[in-house]
Amino acid sequence: MSERELQKATFAAGCFWGVEEAFRKLKGVVSTRVGYTGGWTQNPTYQEVCTGETGHAEAVEITFDPLVISYAELVEHFWNIHDPTSLNRQGWDVGTQYRSAIFVHSDEQRDIAEASRRRLEDSGVYKEPIVTEIVEAKEFWPAEEYHQGYYAKRRRGVVKIVPAE
């Protein structure tokens, strides 16, 4: 398979560890990597992003084979793995770095994401408005190596996440 056949998708839906795990297992997903995007700080570190002052969101960049899984299917999966009505938080994770966002790589992706959001809004599934941003993908800064494949590296049990002090 040549690289030209593969596409990228980028999503933010809270802590990137769980988001990566939710996408990594899908048939047609070739690779995932976690990192930071959507902000203004060049080459940010985890500690900088945690301050909420970089503008970046914790995100997952997905490389996928559109002949196996479509971008529309990835977007539908995105809606199902988090609460898109929760502004700047998912569960215990609070801050703009945990916002819900779809970072589109083309006009076609934007059209698919916006149509999908409209269908979800019109469905009445959520009582609160959907706050997910749909914005142009900016530079993606890979997170530190210890964040990559975090759950896959720790298959032996549930990982207890302890907030940084």
Image: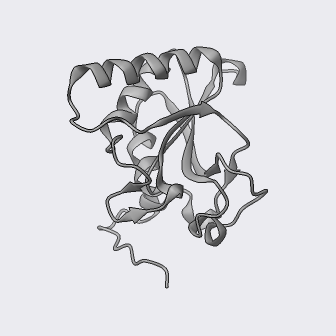
> How many numbered marks does the figure carry?
0
- Residue 149 can be seen, yes or no: no
Q: Position of residue 92 (x, y in %)?
A: 34, 65
Residue drawn at x 36%, y 32% is 77
Residue closest to the far right: 42
Q: Along the line of sight, which residue is nearer the eye, 95 or 4?
A: 95
Q: Which residue is pictured at 47% across the width and 27% down the height?
A: 28
Nearer-the-camera pick, 18 or 130: 130
Query: Can you give x and y, in whole percent of width and height, for residue 127 in the image?
Result: 21, 36
Question: How far across and how far down the image is residue 91, in percent?
Answer: 31, 59
Query: Farthest residue in the bottom direction?
Result: 165
Q: Is residue 8 left or right of residue 149?
A: right
Quarter holding residue 124: top left
Q: Quadrant of residue 146?
A: bottom right
Residue occupying image coordinates x 35% and y 48%? 86
Q: Is residue 49 left or right of residue 125?
A: right
Image height of 7 relative to 107, above or below:
below
Quarter that holds the N terminus: top right
Q: Residue at x 43, y 77 (%)?
A: 163
Report the coloring of the rendering. Answer: one colour
Name the quadrant containing residue 27.
top left
Q: Determine if residue 85 is in view.
A: yes
Q: Is residue 64 above or below residue 37?
A: above
* Residue 149 position (above or below residue 71): below
**What percent of the width, then of the height, locates residue 83?**
31, 44
